[in-house]
Image (cartoon, rainbow, N blue to C red):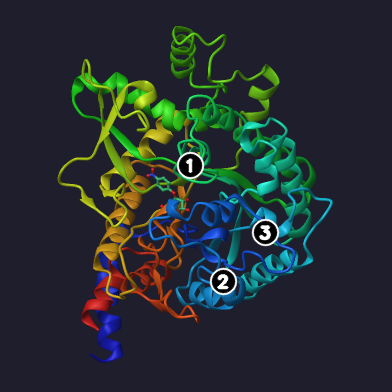
């Protein structure tokens, strides 16, 4: 078909589908994280992280006994990554700084010049390509030294993190306008203290809840540091990225348990920051106090906030960062049924299930339910008001490095459609969308067995060649046209 005819098809398509248009100013991006892509785990003076320690000391912990020692080798091949971001025409690239790469021993008395040069080059490289950097300060790679001092269960980490954040702002805030403090506090604490992620500790009764308090306060302190010392000069924005699934009651009888489970798994991390009143979700706070008492603890396992801490946390955001992948139905455990001790709902007596018709990605936890994202966006607006929401992650996993990935393409298409409906029909203020991930990478305990990349990576080759998948072309066409189906029409007619 000649070019003019293609243009004609496009013109008709875009008129027909005017309602499928993302609002002006809506931004598209893709995300990665340091440990998952960089490699270079011990180059120059980089310090050891809890993931380095985990994969080296407990190789069985990773499904395919792999590690992130080399990963995508983005420490050396970062220009290729930037070329891919540019090739897709994306507005921003979300990546993370490795705390022990910048501060090898966790504290700012020693700043790695190599680490500093590396992140500076990535930031400058993005800007030179017209792509905005969105920088995450903590995507799970804590300096091992700080773990040895108690990690996220030690209240002193609140100031250690604020000091790290101040260092990163001082070095990069002149060129970075959007910051994420912590990626998924829920994964950091509930994953890290349920043995699923580094540090691989098992103490979700006490450890995970201490971690929750400190990881939130660390975020809030970093927010205030930015507000007071950097925002007046640079005017950027900062928030935290929460992982939230859509939870719906299995039957009408399960409404109450669903509300409590949402508060336990998600509200515990969002209510202190986004609610008008601040502090822990009241229903959860009562539940945990009563339960702890029955268990013989002298005080609630959910540690209290002081009034000052409540004020520090309340409103410590410029937007709502949302990582979303999947949905569950919730039911109360039946009489005599004990939810598996380590299962996520066990603390509140809930059982989480998937509906049988939801398809499963390569990651067994990832059940596909596109309507879930719209429901969740509406719920966030209902709970916390008309807040600006940046979707900081959404994506789909398969296996192997093949390029024909119609399942992933359809996942993006169907989820983006629901995001757009939330904007146009429900007036939810979603300002941007981030695909996870730019390229296949080290998927934590799943190693390289689950692939989330828009670009595939061949990990069997020392050159780690990247190649665009069909989903990358699709996503690029949406990002360029800002319309859901017109560009797709182009793909099929051309
Ligand atoms: C995210 N859930 O984690 C992380 O931010 C990424 O590093 C990771 O690679 C990606 O998702 C894919 O797994 C998640 O419970 C943790 O639904 C938990 C959930 C989803 C994603």
Residue 292 vertical placement versus 437 (above, below): above
User: In the displayed image of the protein, which residue is found farthest to the bottom?
Assistant: 2
- Disc assigned to residue 74: 2
In the rendered image, residue 224, in percent from the top left (x then y), is placed at 72, 38
Residue at 59% x, 44% y is 239
Badge 3 is on which residue? 176
Question: Quadrant location of residue 481?
Answer: bottom left
Q: Nearer the viewer, residue 23 or 233?
A: 233
User: Between marks 3 and 1, how big is the CA–CA gap?
Assistant: 25 Å
In the rendered image, residue 472, in percent from the top left (x then y), is placed at 37, 71
Q: Assign a secondary structure to mark 1.
A: helix
Q: Is residue 169 left or right of residue 136?
A: right
Residue 151 vertical placement versus 127 (above, below): above
Q: Nearer the viewer, residue 476 or 74?
A: 74
- Disc assigned to residue 26: none
Mark 3 touches mark 2? (CB < 8 Å): no
Question: Quadrant location of residue 244?
Answer: top left
Q: Assign a secondary structure to mark 3.
A: loop
The answer to which of marks 3 and 2 sits earlier in the sequence is: 2
Q: Nearer the viewer, residue 460 or 179?
A: 460
Q: Is residue 256 left or right of residue 231?
A: left
User: Between marks 3 and 2, how big is the CA–CA gap?
Assistant: 20 Å
Query: Disc 1, ligand 1: is the CB inside 8 Å?
Result: yes
Badge 1 is on which residue? 187
User: Between marks 1 and 2, how big is the CA–CA gap?
Assistant: 24 Å
Q: Crowding near pointer 2: few (<14 within 10 Å), some, many (20+)?
A: some
In the rendered image, residue 238, in percent from the top left (x then y), is placed at 63, 46
The answer to which of marks 1 and 2 sits earlier in the sequence is: 2
Q: Quadrant of the N terminus?
A: bottom left
């Amino acid at each position: 078909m000649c070019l003019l005819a293609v243009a004609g098809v496009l013109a008709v398509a875009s008129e027909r589908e005017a309602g499928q248009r993302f609002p002006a100013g809506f931004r598209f991006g893709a995300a990665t994280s340091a440990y998952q892509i960089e490699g270079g785990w011990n180059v120059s003076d980089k310090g050891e992280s809890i993931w380095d320690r985990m994969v080296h000391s407990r190789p069985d912990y990773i499904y395919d006994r792999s590690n992130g020692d080399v990963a995508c080798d983005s420490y050396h091949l970062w220009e290729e990554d930037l070329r891919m971001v540019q090739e897709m025409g994306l507005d921003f690239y979300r990546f993370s700084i490795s705390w022990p790469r910048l501060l090898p021993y966790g504290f700012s008395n020693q700043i790695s010049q190599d680490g500093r040069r590396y992140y500076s080059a990535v930031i400058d490289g993005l800007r030179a390509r017209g792509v905005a950097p969105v920088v995450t300060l903590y995507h799970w790679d804590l300096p091992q030294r700080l773990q040895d001092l108690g990690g996220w269960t030690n209240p002193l980490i609140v100031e250690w993190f604020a000091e790290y954040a101040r260092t990163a702002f001082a070095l990069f805030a002149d060129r970075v306008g959007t910051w994420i403090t912590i990626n998924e506090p829920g994964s950091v604490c509930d994953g890290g203290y349920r043995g699923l992620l580094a540090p691989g500790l098992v103490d979700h009764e006490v450890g995970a809840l201490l971690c929750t308090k400190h990881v939130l306060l660390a975020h809030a302190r970093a927010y205030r540091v930015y507000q007071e010392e950097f925002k007046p000069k640079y005017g950027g924005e900062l928030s935290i990225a929460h992982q939230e699934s859509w939870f719906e009651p299995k039957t009408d009888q399960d409404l109450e348990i669903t509300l409590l489970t949402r508060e336990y798994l998600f509200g515990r991390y969002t209510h202190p920051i986004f609610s008008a009143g601040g502090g822990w979700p009241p229903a959860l706070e009562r539940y945990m106090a009563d339960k702890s008492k029955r268990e013989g603890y002298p005080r609630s396992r959910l540690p209290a906030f002081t009034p000052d801490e409540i004020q520090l946390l309340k409103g410590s955001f410029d937007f709502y960062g949302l990582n979303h992948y999947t949905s569950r139905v919730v039911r109360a455990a039946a009489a005599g049924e004990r939810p598996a001790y380590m299962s996520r709902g066990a603390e509140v007596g809930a059982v989480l299930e998937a509906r049988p018709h939801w398809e499963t990605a390569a990651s067994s936890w990832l059940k596909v339910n596109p309507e879930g994202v719209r429901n969740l966006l509406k719920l966030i607006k209902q709970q916390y008001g008309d807040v600006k929401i940046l979707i900081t992650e959404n994506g789909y996993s398969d296996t192997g490095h093949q390029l024909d990935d119609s399942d992933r393409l359809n996942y993006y298409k169907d989820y983006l459609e629901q995001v757009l409906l939330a904007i146009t029909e429900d007036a939810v203020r979603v300002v941007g969308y981030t695909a996870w991930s730019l390229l296949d990478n080290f998927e934590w305990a799943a190693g390289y067995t689950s692939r989330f990349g828009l670009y595939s990576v061949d990990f069997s080759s020392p050159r780690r060649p990247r190649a665009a998948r069909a989903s990358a072309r699709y996503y690029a066409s949406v990002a360029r046209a800002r319309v859901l189906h017109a560009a797709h029409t182009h793909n099929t007619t051309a």
